[in-house]
Amino acid sequence: MRYALILLAHGSSDPRWRAPFEHLAEALARRLETPLQLAYMELSEPSLETTVAELAAAGVERAEILPLFFAAGRHLRQDVPGQVEVLAEAHPGIDLRLLPPVGEHPAFVEALAAVIAEQAGEASSG
């Protein structure tokens, strides 16, 4: 089965805002064997719609969408599931699965806490 991972960021019309997400996607693409694509929910390209259409055309059968969000607010509870539902209907050959946002993963919380402690000048107790 052909599989891909879609990293989903919010999106912004400011290219400087997109740069950290693009760098993350590039670094992960070098590190992971799983094919991945970066997509944006709104205001930027490639959009989630464009990305899913390209993956479907390439014969990808399953794609997991990993939101690069801290928490599941309105966008992740309503907007993105609605987008995914429409895309699943438009591309029935690809099984789309929306994952919980990275911010809910315990490892993310630990990594963020370590960065904050370092910025605050506190030594890590690990």
Image (cartoon, rainbow, N blue to C red):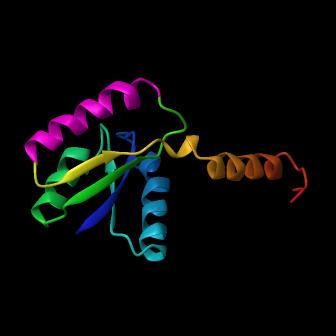
Residue 49 percent coordinates (x, y): 19, 45
User: Is 111 a magenta residue?
Assistant: no
Residue 11 percent coordinates (x, y): 37, 41
Residue 65 percent coordinates (x, y): 35, 49
The residue that appears at 25% across and 48% down in the rendered structure is: 96
Q: Is residue 43 above or below residue 107?
A: above
Q: Judge by depth and name the residue closer to the eye, 97 or 82.
A: 97
Q: Is residue 125 above or below residue 113?
A: below
Q: Please, which residue is most extreme toward the front here?
A: 1
Quadrant for the C terminus in the image: bottom right
The residue that appears at 77% across and 52% down in the rendered structure is: 114
User: Is 82 a magenta residue?
Assistant: yes
Q: Predominant secondary structure in magenta?
A: helix
Q: Is residue 32 above or below residue 12?
A: below
Label count reads 0
Residue 35 percent coordinates (x, y): 33, 69
**18 on left or right of 79:** right
**69 on left or right of 2:** right
- The stretch in magenta equals 73-91
**31 on left or right of 65:** right
Quadrant for the N terminus in the image: bottom left
The residue that appears at 30% across and 33% down in the rendered structure is: 81
Q: Quadrant of residue 51?
A: bottom left
Q: Quadrant of residue 26?
A: bottom left
The residue that appears at 64% across and 47% down in the rendered structure is: 106
Q: Quadrant of residue 61?
A: bottom left
